[in-house]
């Protein structure tokens, strides 16, 4: 039963990771036109770094079994791609040549990232549901 619990924990950790991916993509889209932040620079696109996260079960703690591997958010990093330049001489942030430094956010790419994260979230919810149904059926057999 604890291996099923470890599988649920692994899927739950993936739910948290996909939620973080969606939040970062939404933030990137919301700031796609932000030409000046607190540091005076345009917004820099952010991305999530994921890392494996072993899920330790009781049997694994005793050294008798291998556990499931979940995922965790290891950090949020800024994209180092250069800013885009747009010719807008009337913009308050335009340089002497009339160009404005725009965030390095590609909105269609962020939409694809959100769609991928939403599908992965949905797949992990389905996995948790299948495990729950399996446990429920096993309990029904025991009656």
Image: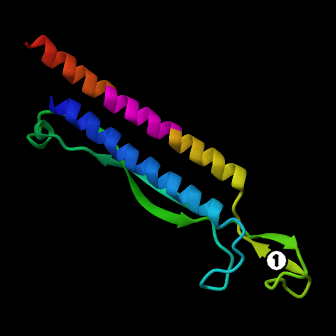
The image quadrant that residue 115 belongs to is top right
Residue 89 image point, x, y percent: 91, 81
Q: Which residue is mark 1?
A: 100
Q: Name the one closer to the observer, 73 or 22.
A: 22
Range of magenta residues: 119-129
Residue 37 image point, x, y percent: 63, 80
Residue sitting at x 46%, y 47%: 18
* Image: 19 above or below 88: above
The image quadrant that residue 80 belongs to is bottom right
Residue sitting at x 7%, y 12%: 143
Q: Secondary structure at mark 1?
A: strand
Position of 24 with respect to 101 (left or right) is left
| Residue at the extreme bottom of the image, as rendered | 96
**Residue 128 included in the magenta stretch of the image:** yes
Residue 129 image point, x, y percent: 33, 29
* Image: 45 above or below 21: below
Q: Quadrant of the N terminus?
A: top left
Residue 102 at least partly seen: yes
Residue 28 image point, x, y percent: 61, 62
Residue sitting at x 58%, y 57%: 26
């Amino acid at each position: 039963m604890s291996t099923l619990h470890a599988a649920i924990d692994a899927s739950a950790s993936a739910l948290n990771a996909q939620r973080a991916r969606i939040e970062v993509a939404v933030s990137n889209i919301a700031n796609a036109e932000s030409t000046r932040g607190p540091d005076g620079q345009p917004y820099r696109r952010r991305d999530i770094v994921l890392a494996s996260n072993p899920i330790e079960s009781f049997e694994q703690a005793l050294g008798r079994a291998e556990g499931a591997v979940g995922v965790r958010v290891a950090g949020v990093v800024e994209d180092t791609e250069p800013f885009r330049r747009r010719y807008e001489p009337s913009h308050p942030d335009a340089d002497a040549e009339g160009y404005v430094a725009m965030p390095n956010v590609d909105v269609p790419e962020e939409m694809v990232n959100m769609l991928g994260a939403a599908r992965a979230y949905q797949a992990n919810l389905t996995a948790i549901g299948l495990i729950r149904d399996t446990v429920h059926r096993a309990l029904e057999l025991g009656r």
